Amino acid sequence: MSARHNAYRDGRIHVCEAMCSTCIFRPGNLMRLKSGRVRQMVDEARAEESAIICHHTLEGDNAVCRGFYDRYPTQPLQIAERLDLIIEVTPEGGNLDPSDALTPTDVYGSLHA
């Protein structure tokens, strides 16, 4: 996470509790981004051992995008999770749908497959 963002504050990393209705990780191109832009953002965040900030939190207090968090466990996010430093938040105007949260099977596949 870039120094210009404050997803890490109060000694915790703030993560959206669910994907927002226009999350860049939802099927389709709901944010109308240029082709390849999401991949570029993911590649940059992973190369920097960082995270993508939810677009609903770009102004004010930031939070890590739930779609990114569920799919790309960067080392800092893994460490924060193991140290119980993750706090789930609902961004103002985020229009979150907790029923869309991914399970570990969604992300990593079934161990029995």
Image (cartoon, helix red, strand yellow):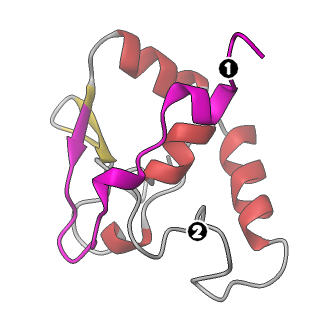
Determine if the magenta segment contains residue 41.
no
Q: Nearer the viewer, mark 1 or mark 2?
A: 1
User: Taking 112 as reference, is 64 left or right?
Assistant: left
* Depth order, front residue of 47/108: 108
Q: Is residue 79 visible?
A: yes
Q: Position of residue 94 (x, y in %)?
A: 28, 71
Determine if the magenta segment contains residue 103.
yes
Which label's residue is closer to the chain start, 1 or 2?
2
Is the C terminus in the top left, top right, bottom left or bottom right quadrant? top right
The image quadrant that residue 74 belongs to is top right
Residue where numbered disc 2 is placed: 24
Q: For the point 65% across and 69% down, which residue is it?
A: 27
Q: Position of residue 53 (x, y in %)?
A: 46, 58
Q: For the point 34% across and 73% down, which residue is it?
A: 56
- Magenta stretch? 87-113
Residue where numbered disc 1 is placed: 110
Dot 1 amino acid type? Ser
Badge 2 element: loop
